[in-house]
Image (cartoon, rainbow, N blue to C red):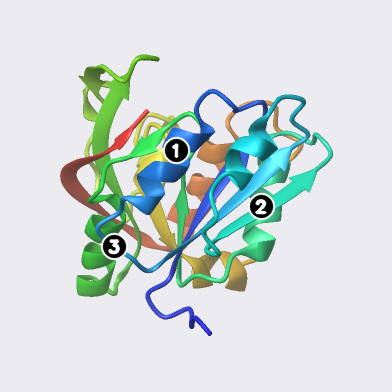
């Protein structure tokens, strides 16, 4: 039985994601870091999202279906099923580069005072062509106690997929995504994380948005 030491729970909310979900899953399976589980929550899709996910035979992929409740509700369902020491976030139409989880784990392992870490990456188009870097549209980068910067605006991290968080922070503080918010649920969640802990930053491009 897999223990949670070093395990990274990758959370993927999916809604009508048949066009991209397989590529997202494949990017997790190609990680240089092998201690992961993948939790895909299908938030009431009406397309072939389920068939795309179930085409993978890995026992490390958990697939959960629920009635449509929005992205925050899907992420919260995934949190309830996450067993890892770390939590990583991946949107169904985004991609991890192979070093993403290892870069995050190595940093958090070497810096126990940091409860979370984020990286750089690229914006891509629907054909996968690299466009701007994520950092070109961010303030910072900021390290350490970054709450004041995060609460000012959502442009510290960009997409939440660039962030990996120690799960004990989420569990011990009962953190959840706010289902009452229409936009900015990720920003709100990470703002509350940043109030609790210091953040690290690794200047490597590991996420495609």
Tag 1–tag 3 contact (CB < 8 Å): no
Where, quadrant-wise, is the C terminus in this rendering? top left
Tag 3–tag 2 contact (CB < 8 Å): no
Q: Residue furthest left?
A: 203
Q: Which residue is mark 2?
A: 63
Is residue 63 visible in the rendered image? The answer is yes
Report the side of 126 relative to 49 (left or right): left
Residues under labels 1 and 3: Cα distance? Answer: 16 Å
Which circle's residue, 2 or 1, is located before the other in the chain? 1
Q: Is residue 155 above or below residue 57?
A: above
- Among the 4 quarters of the image, the one containing residue 161: top left
Tag 2–tag 1 contact (CB < 8 Å): no
Residues under labels 2 and 1: Cα distance? Answer: 14 Å
Please give the name of the residue rendered at 30% of the width and 54% of the height, measured from the top-left corner: 31
Rate crowding at label 3 as few (under 14), some (14 to 19) or many (20 or more) other CA atoms within 10 Å: many
Q: Is residue 208 above or below residue 160?
A: above
Task: Locate residue 38, reporting x and y percent.
Answer: 52, 56
Task: Locate residue 34, reporting x and y percent.
Answer: 33, 65
Which circle's residue, 3 or 2, is located before the other in the chain? 3
Q: Is residue 137 above or below residue 152?
A: above
**Badge number at residue 24:** 1
Task: Locate residue 120, reporting x and y percent.
Answer: 24, 38
Please give the name of the residue rendered at 39% of the width and 55% of the height, measured from the top-left corner: 164
Which circle's residue, 1 or 3, is located before the other in the chain? 1
**Badge number at residue 159:** none
Element class at badge 2: strand
Please give the name of the residue rendered at 38% of the width and 31% of the height, measured from the top-left corner: 158
Q: Which residue is mark 3?
A: 33
């Amino acid at each position: 039985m897999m223990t949670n030491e070093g395990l990274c729970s990758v959370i993927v909310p999916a809604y009508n994601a048949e066009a991209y979900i397989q590529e997202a899953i494949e990017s997790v399976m190609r990680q240089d870091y092998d201690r992961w589980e993948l939790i895909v929550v299908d938030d009431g899709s009406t397309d072939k999202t389920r068939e795309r996910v179930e085409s993978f035979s890995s026992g490390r992929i958990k697939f959960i279906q629920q009635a449509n409740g929005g992205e925050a509700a899907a992420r919260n369902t995934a949190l309830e099923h996450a067993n890892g020491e770390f939590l990583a976030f991946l949107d169904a139409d985004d991609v991890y580069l192979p070093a993403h989880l290892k870069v995050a784990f190595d940093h958090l392992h070497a810096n126990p005072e940091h409860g979370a870490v984020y990286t750089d990456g690229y914006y891509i188009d629907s054909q996968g062509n690299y466009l701007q870097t994520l950092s070109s549209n961010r303030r910072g980068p900021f390290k350490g106690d970054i709450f004041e910067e995060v609460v000012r605006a959502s442009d510290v991290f960009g997409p939440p997929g660039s962030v990996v968080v120690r799960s004990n922070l989420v569990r011990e503080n009962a953190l959840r995504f706010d289902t009452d918010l229409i936009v900015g649920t990720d920003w709100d969640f990470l703002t509350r994380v940043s109030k609790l802990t210091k953040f690290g930053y690794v200047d490597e491009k590991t996420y495609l948005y």
